[in-house]
Structure formats: structure tokens, C-alpha cells
Image (tube, grey):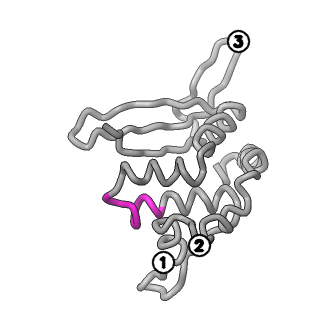
Amino acid sequence: METTDNPTYEKIKTKLSKYTKWKKGVEAPDGNTHLKETLDFIDPATGRKAYYSDDICGLLKLLRNTRQHSARAKEDVFVLIVAQNFPRLMGDFQKVMFKQGYTLNESVDSSKNQTFACQFTKSHTDSGIQKVDHEDSRHLQVTLKELN
């Protein structure tokens, strides 16, 4: 979306600006250890830390990397990490995406992984009837394991 629909991308960043300065809470002495580990992780291949901007984009990148690395085997714990550290993040994010014309399409994969996938797709309206353009490249795909 950053390159395909930059004006909308910038609006979303602005509307979620309350998540700016998130690093202060993560780096605090009582901050979550999984988030700290990911923030401080030094890539052995490059010898450098990943850069996380102190805005919503950096926060989402940190959460993605935490889930993929530090909290990888702890799916149930990861949900608690997000809920305890950023309790309104998921609702705020979904609301802003919806207001910008993106709809949430959810599906559950019945395989043994029980994957829950959600995709935000740009929707278009003509005379009050909503149509979802699945060919539109402006979408975000998030995949999380469903909790039991």
C-alpha cells in the first residue's frame, strides 16, 4: 500500500499516530522480554540491529518479527503480549482500515495448523452497493494461528 496507494497509506499512519513513541514502553525496565529481544536482536549475517521506526509502521514490523522469531513457538503468549502492551491496537487498526475503504475478509483453514487468515481488500461502492475488487493490489494479508 505504501507504493500503490501512498495517500491512503499516509492517512492511515496519521490516524494511528497515537502509536508513535511506542519504543519507550518496550524499552522500559518492565517492558515485555520478547519485544525487547526482537528490538535488540543483532542479525548474525550483517552484525546489525534491524531498524524500527518509532511509529505505527515500526510497531507492526516489531510485532511481526517478534511473532516470527522470539515468540515463534508461543502463539497463545503472543496474543497476550499484544493485548497487554497495546490493548487497542488491533481494533484501532481495523477501524482505520475500514474507514479508508478496506474491508476485512476472514477465513479459517481447516488443516491441522488451524490458520486464521484475514485480508484487507480495497472496496468500491456504486449507488450504495458494495463491491470488493479482488484484483486490486492494495491489500494487506495477515495470518495468525487460531487459538483454542
Establish if 86 lies above or below 21. above
State the CA–CA distance, disc 2 to disc 3.
51 Å
- Residue 29: image tag: 2
Label 1 or label 3, whichever comes before in sequence order: 1
Q: What residue is rendered at 40% in x and 45% in y?
A: 144
Q: How far across and how far down the image is residue 69, in percent?
A: 39, 66
List the single residue furthest toward the left: 112
* Residue at image coords 70%, 54%: 19
Of callouts 1 and 2, which one flags the residue occurring earlier in the amino acid sequence? 2
Between the C-alphas of marks 1 and 2, the distance is 17 Å
Extreme residue in the front direction: 30
The numbered disc on residue 128 is: 3
Q: Would you call the spot at circle 1 few (<14 residues within 10 Å), some (14-19), or many (20 or more)?
A: some
Q: Amino acid at mark 3?
A: Gly
Residue 18 locus on image (x, y percent): 75, 51
73, 51: nearer the viewer:
73
Residue nearer the viewer, 50 or 139:
50
Say if the magenta span includes residue 66: yes
Q: Quadrant of residue 39?
A: bottom right
| Mark positioned earlier in the residue sequence (2 or 3) | 2
Marks 1 & 3, CB-CB < 8 Å contact: no
| Total labels drawn | 3
Q: CA distance from mark 1 to mark 3?
A: 49 Å
Question: In the depicted view, which residue is nearer to us: 92 or 124?
Answer: 92
Residue 41 shows which numbered tag? 1
Q: Residue 98, which numbered label?
A: none
- Tag 1–tag 2 contact (CB < 8 Å): no
Region in magenta: 65-73
